[in-house]
Every structure is written in C-alpha cells, then in structure tokens.
Amino acid sequence: EPEVTQTPSHQVTQMGQEVILRCVPISNHLYFYWYRQILGQKVEFLVSFYNNEISEKSEIFDDQFSVERPDGSNFTLKIRSTKLEDSAMYFCASSGRGLGVETQYFGPGTRLLVL
Amino acid sequence: KNEVEQSPQNLTAQEGEFITINCSYSVGISALHWLQQHPGGGIVSLFMLSSGKKKHGRLIATINIQEKHSSLHITASHPRDSAVYICAVRTPMNRDDKIIFGKGTRLHILP
C-alpha cells in the first residue's frame, strides 16, 4: 500500500540553525500538508500546498517557515532560524483531493529537537 | 474556548468492553476526521465523515451535523486498540480547508 515517508526520523539542531524536513507524498496525490505536535500538546495545522503554491497557512507559519516542492516527488518544510519552541514532531500528509472530500495520509513524522 | 472538544480525556477499560469517545465542535465544517496516534507518535487516519455513519471492522464513527457532534465507537475492545484517538475537523477557508485538532482521548485497554 502506498505511504507517505518522511526524513529524517529525528533531527537535533542548535538554536539559530536552518533545518529542512523532507517528505515524499503518495505519488498521485496533489494536496500536501504540514502539521506539528509539540510534546504533550495537540496536533496543529501549519500549511497546505497545492499546485505549487501555499493554499492556506496558520498563524504559526510565519516568515521563518517555508515550503517547497523542489521536484516531482519531494515536499519540504524549511525552518530558517530555529528557536527552542520549534521543538516538536512534524507530520507531513497528502491527499488526492482537498476541500474536505478525501482523507489525508500521514507520514511517520520527524522529531525535531532544538537545543 | 477550544473549537474541538473531546471527551473523555483519558479512558481505561477492560478488554472486550464497548468504547465510546465523543467529539464536539463549534465551527462550520466540511468534514470530520477520526485519527489514531500510536505510542510511537505515528498517526493513522481511521475515518473521514461529512454525514451519517461509517463502519470499519470493530470501529464505528457517527456524526450529527445539526448537533455538531461525532462519536467513535470500538466494539469488543482489545489491548492493541490502546492509543490516542484524535478528532479533527476541516473548516473551509479561502482556497482550501484548515484542519483543527482536538486534544485527543488516551485509551488504555487492559487485558
């Protein structure tokens, strides 16, 4: 069964460093999402992406964050200058269609620790 | 005020018991998801509902749009059902949906 994959599974970085989290969505999917979950808290929406541009973003997704689909398979989340509070599990998801008509498939997550 | 409220927050039950987890929301939605988060952190989508009822194996999900309420039921619960169950709603924005998550219900099934 096709699945969403994410790399790395864990990343430790120093405050102020840039990180890039990578996701490979399911190959025929068109809608891509990033979420984060701070330890012990609920999952939070960051951004949705369709047709090579951001569709929606949350208040969390400020200028420090960016997303890109650099080729036909990868979908990346970049954090330019990490802060301690960026430590969280980051989940990528994809769906064949957006607008609430199809389920999303989640990747296993990348656990980011900012020291 | 949280836009998505789940109850209970924690639930411990004996193997074989019938489990109900509730979700209430206060926003207009296009769909509602029930997700399962395993102890290792991975998230699996169980159901997406916009009306009525869905069943998959021992899992049943219902939604009442007028009452803004959904329930997830597990019949003949088993220790492997132990996980956090998350309700998430999709609320329409300008071009796509925003998804709002509940805090989750931690379920522990005792053998």
Image (cartoon, rainbow, N blue to C red):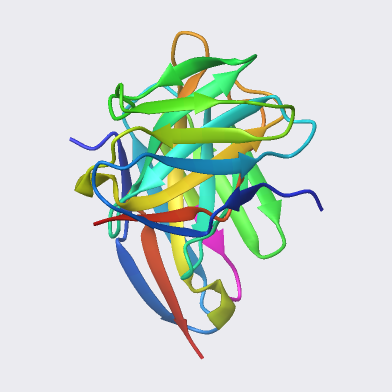
Give the residue furthest to the top: B94
Q: Is residue A23 above or below residue B76?
A: above
Instruction: Give the percent coordinates (x, y) of residue A99.
Output: 59, 20
Marks counted in the figure total: 0
Inspect the magenta stretch and tell me whether residue B63 lies in it.
no
Q: Nearer the viewer, residue B5 or B71?
A: B5
Q: Which residue lies at the image location 49% right of the left edge and 26% below the top edge?
A: A67
The residue shown at (47%, 40%) is A20
Q: Which residues are magenta?
A: B72-78
Q: Against B83, is A25 above or below? A: above
Determine whether, in the image, residue B63 is placed left or right of residue B47: left
Residue at position x 60%, y 69% in the image: B75
The answer to whether one can see residue A17 in this image is: yes
Q: Is residue A46 left or right of residue A39?
A: right
Task: Tell me the quarter of the image containing the C terminus of chain A.
Answer: bottom left
- Up the image or down, A75 lies above or below A1; here it is above
The picture places residue A33, in percent across and down from the top left corner, at: 53, 32
Q: Residue A103's x, y, as percent?
A: 64, 37
Observer able to see residue B16: no
User: Where residue B78 sits in the image (x, y, percent)?
Assistant: 58, 80
Q: In the rendered structure, does residue B77 fall within the stretch colored magenta?
A: yes
Q: Nearer the viewer, residue B33 or A105?
A: A105
Residue situated furthest left in the rendering: B1
Q: Give the residue displayed 28% in from the left and 41% down from the top.
A: A82
